[in-house]
C-alpha cells in the first residue's frame, strides 16, 4: 500500500484533504501527523478515525529528531504538507512561531524525505500546500499567475514564501520530486473562528460586534474548502514534478460586501429580520501592513489538470452557515480556554 503522510490533517483544510484521501483511495495508507495546536482538532475527523487505512500520529514538525525517526520507521512514499501556523494576525504578534513551524518545520520534513528517498526518487513526491499571499498585494487590477514574483508582506506570507523557496531549492539541488500549489482564501466547515468568515458567524450567534479592519475595502478571492481539497487531489495525482499550480475561486469580494452578505444569510438562517446582523458591523483599527487585494488566475490548473471550483459563493456560504449552526458543540469546544483569552486581548487592543 502506498504510504501517504499528510501533515496538519487535524486542521481546517487538512481535515478535508484527509477525509477525501481516506475515502477515495482505499489502497493508500493515510498517516495524519499533527501537533494539535489550538487550530488542530480531532473532532474534525471522527467519521474517518476508525477506518483501516487511516492512522493519526501526534507530533511536532519542528522536532527534527522525531521527524527523522518517523520517516525511517514508516518510509512514507509521499508527503502532502499542510501543517503550518496560518493566521496573519497571529504572525504580527508572534512571528517567531511562524518561522519555527513554517520554515524550520518544512526543512525538517524535506531533510527526512531526502534522507529516506535519496537514490530512489521514482514514485516519490513532496507536495507543499501554500498560499497566494506569497505574491504580495495587488492593486485594483491584475491577477497572480504562477510566474508572478514573490513579494510577501506579512510575517505569515514571508514564512510561507520561504518554505516554498526551500522546497524548490531541494528539488533543484538534490533532485527531490515536488509540486507546490498556491491557493486563495478558503472558507467552509471546520475553520477556526479567528478567520473572517467563521469569526463573523460566531459573533453574530453571540450578538457580538463584527470587527471590520480599516474601511473594509480589502479584497480576497474566496474558495470553498472542499473545492480546494479536490484541487489538491488533482495536483497530487496529475501535477508535473517541479511545477506550481495556482488555485482560486474566481470569486473576489471586498470584506465589507462579504460580511454584509454573510449577515443576510445568517438573518435568514436564524429567522430574524434581514438587517439585524448588519447592525453589529463595527469598523476597527486596520491590520498592520494589510494587503489590499489578492486575486488568482487559476487557468493553468483548469487547462492542465481539468480542475474548476464546483460551488458558487452563495451556495458555499449557505452551506457554511448551516454547518456552523448545526455544530454548536464544535464551536463551543474550540472557542473555550486559550483561544478565548487570545481573542479577548486582541479585540480589546483594537
Ligand atoms: P489551520 O491553522 O486550520 O491548521 C493547521 C494545522 O497544522 C493544525 O491542525 C495544527 O495543529 C497543525 N500544526 C501547526 N503547527 C504544527 C507543528 N509544529 N507540527 C505539526 N502540526 C502542526 O490551517 P489551514 O487554514 O487548514 O491551512 C493549512 C495549510 O494551507 C497551511 O499550510 C496554509 O498556509 C495553507 N493555506 C491556507 C489557506 C486558508 O485560507 N486557510 C489558503 C491557502 C493556503
Ligand atoms: P483572514 O480571514 O484573517 O484571512 P487573510 O488575512 O489570510 O486574508 O482575513 C480576511 C480578510 O478580512 C483580510 O482582509 C482581513 C479582514 N479581517 C477583518 O476585517 N476583520 C477580522 O476580524 C478578521 C479576522 C479579518
Image: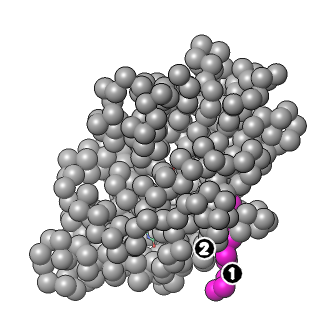
Q: Relative to 248, say whether 162 is above or below.
A: above
Question: Disc 1 on helix, strand or loop?
Answer: loop
Front-most of residues 325 and 250: 250
Q: Relative to 261, say whether 106 is above or below.
A: above
Residue 142: assigned label: 1
Residue 340 position, x and y percent, is: 33, 51
Front-most of residues 345 and 71: 71
Front-most of residues 95 and 226: 226
Q: How many marks?
A: 2
Residue 154 position, x and y percent, is: 65, 61
Residue 182 position, x and y percent, is: 63, 57
Tell me whether circle 2 and circle 1 mark residues in contact (CB < 8 Å): yes
Q: Mark 2 points at which residue?
A: 295
Q: How crowded is mark 1: few (under 14 residues within 10 Å), some or many (20 or more)?
A: few
How many angstroms separate mark 2 from mark 1 (CA)?
Answer: 8 Å
Residue 113 position, x and y percent, is: 70, 27
Question: Disc 2 on helix, strand or loop?
Answer: loop
Kindly identify the residue that appears in the image at 48 percent across and 65 percent down: 309
Does residue 137 belong to the magenta stretch? yes
Magenta segment range? 134-144
Task: Name the dominant secondary structure of the magenta segment.
Answer: loop
- Report whether residue 191 is seen: yes
Amino acid at each position: 500500500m502506498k504510504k501517504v503522510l499528510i501533515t496538519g490533517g487535524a486542521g481546517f483544510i487538512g481535515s478535508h484533504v484527509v477525509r477525501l484521501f481516506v475515502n477515495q483511495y482505499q489502497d493508500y495508507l493515510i498517516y495524519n501527523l499533527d501537533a494539535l495546536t489550538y487550530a488542530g482538532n480531532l473532532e474534525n475527523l471522527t467519521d474517518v478515525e476508525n477506518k483501516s487505512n487511516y492512522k493519526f500520529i501526534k507530533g511536532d514538525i519542528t522536532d527534527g529528531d522525531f521527524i527523522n525517526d518517523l520517516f525511517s520507521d514508516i518510509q512514507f512514499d509521499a508527503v502532502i504538507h499542510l501543517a503550518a501556523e496560518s493566521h496573519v494576525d497571529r504572525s504580527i504578534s508572534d512571528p517567531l512561531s511562524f518561522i519555527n513551524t513554517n520554515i524550520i518545520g518544512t526543512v525538517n520534513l524535506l531533510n527526512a524525505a531526502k534522507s529516506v528517498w535519496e537514490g530512489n526518487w521514482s514514485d516519490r513526491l513532496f507536495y507543499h500546500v501554500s498560499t497566494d499571499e506569497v505574491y504580495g498585494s495587488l492593486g485594483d487590477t491584475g491577477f497572480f499567475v504562477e510566474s508572478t514574483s514573490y513579494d510577501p508582506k506579512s510575517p505569515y506570507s514571508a514564512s510561507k514564501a520561504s518554505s516554498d523557496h526551500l522546497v524548490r531549492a531541494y528539488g533543484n539541488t538534490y533532485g527531490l520530486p515536488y509540486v507546490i500549489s498556491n491557493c486563495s482564501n478558503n472558507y467552509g466547515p471546520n475553520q477556526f473562528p479567528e478567520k473572517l468568515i467563521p469569526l463573523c458567524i460566531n459573533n453574530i450567534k453571540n450578538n457580538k460586534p463584527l470587527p471590520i479592519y480599516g474601511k473594509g475595502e480589502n479584497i480576497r478571492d474566496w474558495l470553498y474548502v472542499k473545492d480546494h481539497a479536490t484541487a489538491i487531489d488533482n495536483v497530487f495525482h496529475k501535477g508535473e514534478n517541479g511545477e506550481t499550480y495556482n488555485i482560486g475561486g474566481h470569486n473576489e469580494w471586498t470584506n465589507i460586501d462579504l460580511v454584509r452578505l454573510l449577515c443576510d444569510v445568517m438573518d435568514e438562517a436564524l429567522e430574524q429580520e434581514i438587517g439585524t446582523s448588519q447592525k453589529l458591523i463595527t469598523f476597527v483599527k486596520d491590520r498592520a501592513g494589510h494587503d489590499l487585494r489578492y486575486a488568482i488566475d487559476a487557468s493553468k490548473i483548469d487547462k492542465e489538470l481539468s480542475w474548476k471550483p464546483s460551488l458558487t459563493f452563495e451556495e458555499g456560504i449557505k452551506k457554511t452557515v448551516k454547518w456552523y449552526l448545526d455544530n454548536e458543540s464544535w464551536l463551543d469546544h474550540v472557542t473555550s480556554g486559550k483561544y478565548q483569552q487570545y481573542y479577548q486581548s486582541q479585540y480589546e487592543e483594537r
